[in-house]
Amino acid sequence: MEKRSILNSKIFKLSRICALFVALLAISGTAFSQEKANNNPDKPYDPKVAIFEHIGDAHAWHVSLPLVKEFSIPLPVIIYTNKGLEVFMSDKFYNANNEETAYQGKNYAYVLENGKIKVADAAGKPDETVRVLDFSITRNVASMWLGMIVLLIIFGSVSSTYKKRVGKAPKGLQSFMEPLIVFVRDDIAIPNIGVKHGKYMSLLLTLFFFILINNLLGLVPFFPGGFNLTGNIAVTLSLSFIVLLVINFSGNKYYWKHIFAPDIPLWLYIIMVPVELIGIISKPFALMIRLFANITAGHIIVLSLISLIFIFKSLAVSPASIVFVVFMDTIELLVAFLQAYIFTMLTALFVGMAVEEHHHEHGAEI
Amino acid sequence: MELVTPELGLVFWTTISFLIFLFLLRKFAWKPILGAINDRERSIEDSLAKADAAKFEMERLSEEIEASLKQARIERDDILSEARKVKEKIIAESKDAAQAEGAKMIEKARIEITSLKAIAMADVKNQVASLSLEIAEKVLRKQFEDSKKQDELVTELLKEVKI
């Protein structure tokens, strides 16, 4: 039995290494194709454009099968202007020759400017006077839904396995997921929140797995992955805003007393109350910035290392570049787990601080 | 700057999707999964507790068995020694009885022998007496067939008689 498991782990390691190399090939393919898309013969390669195109959002999902084909999957555009809602597919912005053009919608003509949808004036130039609220299903929204569907499938099947195998030892995917779930419960929720952890388990588990799957899918360099969702400030903002609401709505009287009536001399209130009020915002704010910065930085480093090949215009650079990318990808794999853990852990910590009982009992006589 | 400017659309979709996702997972995954894990942990704890209790019970039982075995052993020893005593007593008693019986029988035999001996002696005496008389008669007859000898004897006897 023991021998078999060693064999399995060896195969597992081997397959991981292979996957990493395939990934590397593909990432260079992606970067290369992006480079090609941006590259006019008279304009030198600009790594900033390529990198920011990757880590930013887009109205189409770029797919490249290395050395085979590359194309963009059009995504729905939903925009709201002062004349009302308008929905169309993003490929309307491109003509038959795959060049950007203006699209004449119902209310206005629209044009893409650096990936942003703007109302176009008669000359086809962006008209800044009309405000466009963009609720499009962008690449990040689509990839977020993809990640959610993956998680729903995984946990739907795991939960049905639990229903089928009542009282039995976990098996298959279930035994892979159970340690993670139990980890979130026993090492994140219970130590930080304590007995009241049950109410917050759903949020913590969802946060953990949502961040984890999107971190991991973001590391996959080809089609279904390769996005920068958890490194997008809008996403981390939304997550940490939900956390902010959860913290403050679950805050008990001790939590609020700590903020508005701490056990300190009265004259210190002038300093402490504003500091505590800032603390309400700064805790989730730190969560937001931490996740955003970590993931984005990782993506930028990997893409920069790949870009070296194109900056030097030499294939000879690629071995060095790839060695560093392997190194970075390995670290990013760690970071993917680490950031999911830290985000969840700090959420649990803040919630735990908000629901803690008898916070200041020892100082009650002052 | 664009990098740190959240886009309204993405904030909107993330918030909506995340809340729906949270609700879906809560309903279809976390509740059943955590419930199952808790149930299983509880059943494992129960089983462990039961196993402990069973172990304790078994120890208690084996102690009880040990104790009753000891008791039984003591009782057996008691019974054996009792039996031994009884045996010895019976043997002793029967020995005594046998001895007494033997003595009695010997006594009886002795008495019988004595009486038989007396009878026999009396018989022998009678026989001896009659035999002696017969012998004496025969001797006398033989002695006194000769009249001379009779005279001699008479004379002698007369000599002895002294008046």
Image (cartoon, grey):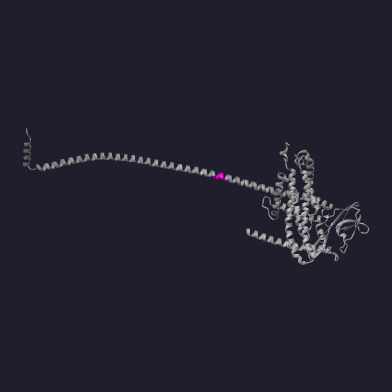
- Say which residue appears at 20% left-offset and 40% top-offset: B125
Quarter of the image where the N terminus of chain B is located: bottom right
Quarter of the image where the C terminus of chain B is located: top left
Task: Specify whether residue A366 is painted magenta.
Answer: no
- Say which residue appears at 7% left-offset and 41% top-offset: B149
Bounds of the magenta segment: B58-62
The relative height of residue B154 versus residue A12 in the rendered view (above or below) is above
Q: Is residue A57 left or right of residue B56?
A: right
User: Residue B15 at what x, y percent from top left?
Assistant: 81, 50
Callout count: 0
User: Residue A27 at what x, y percent from top left?
Assistant: 77, 62
- Is A218 in front, or is B37? A218
The relative height of residue A14 versus residue B141 in the rendered view (above or below) is below
- Is A8 in front, or is B159? A8
- Say which residue appears at 65% left-offset and 48% top-offset: B44
Q: Is residue B92 left or right of residue A15?
A: left
* Residue A225 shows up from this direction: no
- Is B40 in front, or is A130? A130
